[in-house]
Image: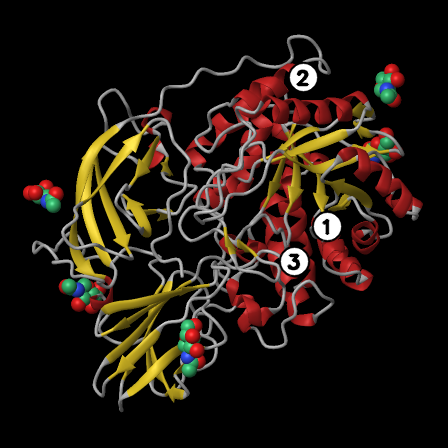
Amino acid sequence: MRFLLEALAAVSALSATVAAGGASSSGNFSYNRHEFLLDGSPYQIIGGQMDPQRVPPEFWTHRLKMARAMGLNTIFSYLYWNMHEPSPGEWDFQGRNDVAKFFRLAQDEGLKVVLRPGPYICGERDWGGFPAWLSQVPGMAVRQNNGPFLDATKAYIDRLGEELGELQITQGGPILMTQLENEYGSFGKDKEYLAALAAILRDNFDVFLYTNDGGGQSYLEGGQLHGVLAVIDGDSKTGFAARDKYVTDPTSLGPQLNGEYYITWIDQWGSDYPHQQISGSQASIDKAVEDLDWTLAGNYSFSIYMFHGGTNFGFENGGIRDDGPLAAVTTSYDYGAPLDESGRPTDVYFKLREMISKYVPKGSIPDVPSLPQRATIPEFDLKPVVGMFGLQQTPTQEAKDPISMDALGQAYGYVLYEHIVTKDVSGNVTIGDGARDRAMIYVNGVRVGVVDTIYKTPATVKVALKKGDSFQILVENLGRVDVRQRLREQVKGIVGSVAVGCHVLKKWSMYSLPLATLPSNLSAQDQEYKVKANDSPVFYTGSFSLPVGTSSDLSGDTFITVPKGVKGVLWVNGVNMGRYWTVGPQQSLYVPGSVLREQNEVVLLELEPQPGTNISAQGISERQWFNNPDPDAP
Ligand SMILES: *[C@@H]1O[C@H](CO)[C@@H](O)[C@H](O)[C@H]1NC(C)=O
Ligand SMILES: *[C@@H]1O[C@H](CO)[C@@H](O)[C@H](O)[C@H]1NC(C)=O
Ligand SMILES: *[C@@H]1O[C@H](CO)[C@@H](O)[C@H](O)[C@H]1NC(C)=O
Ligand SMILES: *[C@@H]1O[C@H](CO)[C@@H](O)[C@H](O)[C@H]1NC(C)=O
Ligand SMILES: *[C@@H]1O[C@H](CO)[C@@H](O)[C@H](O)[C@H]1NC(C)=O
């Protein structure tokens, strides 16, 4: 039996070698104290970050060509565990998750790849890329030398090894090196954990490992591991000096790489948060060009974070939180990057291209491909068809106290909690240990208030309930915080009991509304739904044709706006394009041409529908970022 298995293994190893050998021959990436070496020759990494899972796969080749045309030679990519393993042992490497395909395409474009697989990646993703189900595993403690965590991590990394092993440079692929953890020094200093994780990675990948930490003493000391190259992020000048000062283990010293040079920063929802960009600001662009020019002139390496940010489609965005309110990251992850969310080059792109061209052989940077204009879609009506609360007649679960979203087995979206009042009671509403994250409160289907963790001062909602009333709380998960690691803080929905005044309400029905797929009977509704004052959320439907002269490619790219929408979610042809919110700064959703057809079905979930107002949408070719007052701010 054993012999047979070994023989089979030998055969499959042989065929893997042949397949890889057919594509290109194996290479060797290494480093000495001052230089990276590709097949023995100095290799300066002129890198930029682009995560395949934030970009429509139909446009991967285009985005990679744009990277080459700016002069980049290497793409840095985070992988999102929560998309690869949506429930334990259920793997997804299709569509946006077909990361092996993305790396092959990168290689076809002459780009090398730096793999940043996590398991923890931060990246302003929901829980830094961790699957939400981790919080429900008994004994789990993430980013620690913890059995359940390392077991789950090993299953994930082993699966990545199967997908990506043959794409390493040692096997003829583009992958140069693999990151160990991510800014671990900002979180802890447990070297046993780092060593255990390094062993799991080394079982699957033979390219060398590196750590990536902020350029300060505690970050570098906490994140460094014996035998693993230490790399910084943030400011290159101070970071490089800090690396050589605080990393004293010679086995972690080598060439200087700024693993994340921040071109700008993320956008968060809120009336007070303008869009982050340096585009249009000459002084800021000059500063970025100067920083990166200095890095290349010193023979150092960098990766621009982000070269191309892309989109947090659906409910994929994360949040950021220290001790104050939650910062909910927008659907757009434009990031003010050189290549904008729709894959178009900005003024920053051209300035960086010009600077990089000084450091590479003349003529080695391809021309910038010309791109079609984005499409304009004339205004079209959306008609209210069905109330969200009427969709699901039977509760997912019933219990004395509310059950959290996560304990219901749900990762994203909404949970509706309902209590039928058994005796008259009035007072302020207390929702568990706080809203997680946005709680909309209804009495007999009429909205009476909103409590949201994004507000600096939490709202107080007072109710007077009568026996027999339906008291409902719709809770929206606005995105798990990317750097908080305590499991309890990552649980969404309601955690704890709900009280009115000092009276704790018992007996709740929970309705799971993940909206992972659209309700099937939406367009079958021939009756128009009559929106009432302060109504519960309503689905609207509408349609539009592919604009003349465009097709399902870059020429169909558009930004859809819903000018009268307050807050909600937009689907085009059944694909969740993400959240919209009047507060801004994002006022339009990037809809890639790749999701469009001749005739396009649009569904909108408006959380705060207004009676007597038609909702319409339109596609604009030039997006605007701005803020509006928040109609729900306390
Ligand atoms: C890779 O290159 C390094 C430095 O040039 C050399 O020491 C090492 O032996 C090479 N490894 C392989 C497998 O060729
Ligand atoms: C960078 O490398 C080149 C070629 O090896 C060398 O001539 C130059 O002096 C180096 N510059 C610095 C700042 O080390
Ligand atoms: C829509 O379908 C769901 C089941 O998919 C059903 O529970 C619900 O009653 C239907 N709603 C309407 C308004 O027909
Ligand atoms: C209810 O909330 C209001 C507004 O925050 C506050 O002024 C009032 O004291 C609260 N009532 C009680 C009984 O806590
Ligand atoms: C809403 O749209 C319908 C159909 O397009 C139209 O007949 C009606 O006048 C509009 N109502 C308002 C308030 O704009």
Helix, strand or loop for disc 3: helix
Q: Position of residue 181 (x, y in %)?
A: 70, 53
Q: CA distance from mark 1 to mark 2?
A: 31 Å
Residue 180 - label: 1
- Circle nearer the N terminus (1, 2): 1
State whether residue 408 appears in this view. no
**Which residue ends up furthest to the top in the rendered image?**
362
Color style of the picture = secondary structure
Q: Crowding near pointer 3: few (<14 within 10 Å), some, many (20+)?
A: few
Question: How packed is label 2: few (under 14 Cα within 10 Å), some, or many (20 or more)?
Answer: some
Residue 59 spot, x, y in % from top left: 44, 31
Could you tell me how far apart the alpha carbons at marks 3 and 2 are, in whole angstroms?
58 Å
Residue drawn at x 49%, y 41% is 333
Point out residue 320 in the picture as x, y percentages from the top left corner: 56, 54
Mark 1: which secondary structure? loop
| Mark number displayed over residue 241 | none
Taking the image as shown, residue 447 lies to the left or right of residue 452, namely: left
Q: Mark 3 or mark 2, which has the lower sequence index?
A: 3
Type of the residue with mark 2: Met
Q: Which residue is mark 3?
A: 4
Which mark is nearer the camera, 1 or 3?
Answer: 1
Q: CA distance from mark 1 to mark 3?
A: 35 Å
Q: Nearer the viewer, residue 356 or 218?
A: 218
Label 2, secondary structure: give it: helix
Mark 2 — residue? 355
What residue sits 28% from the left and 27% below the top? 376
Residue 210's x, y, as percent?
77, 44
Q: Quadrant of residue 108?
A: top right
* 162 over 134 or under it: above or below: above
Q: Identify which amino acid the numbered label 3 is placed on.
A: Leu
Which amino acid type corresponds to the residue marked 1 in the rendered image?
Answer: Leu
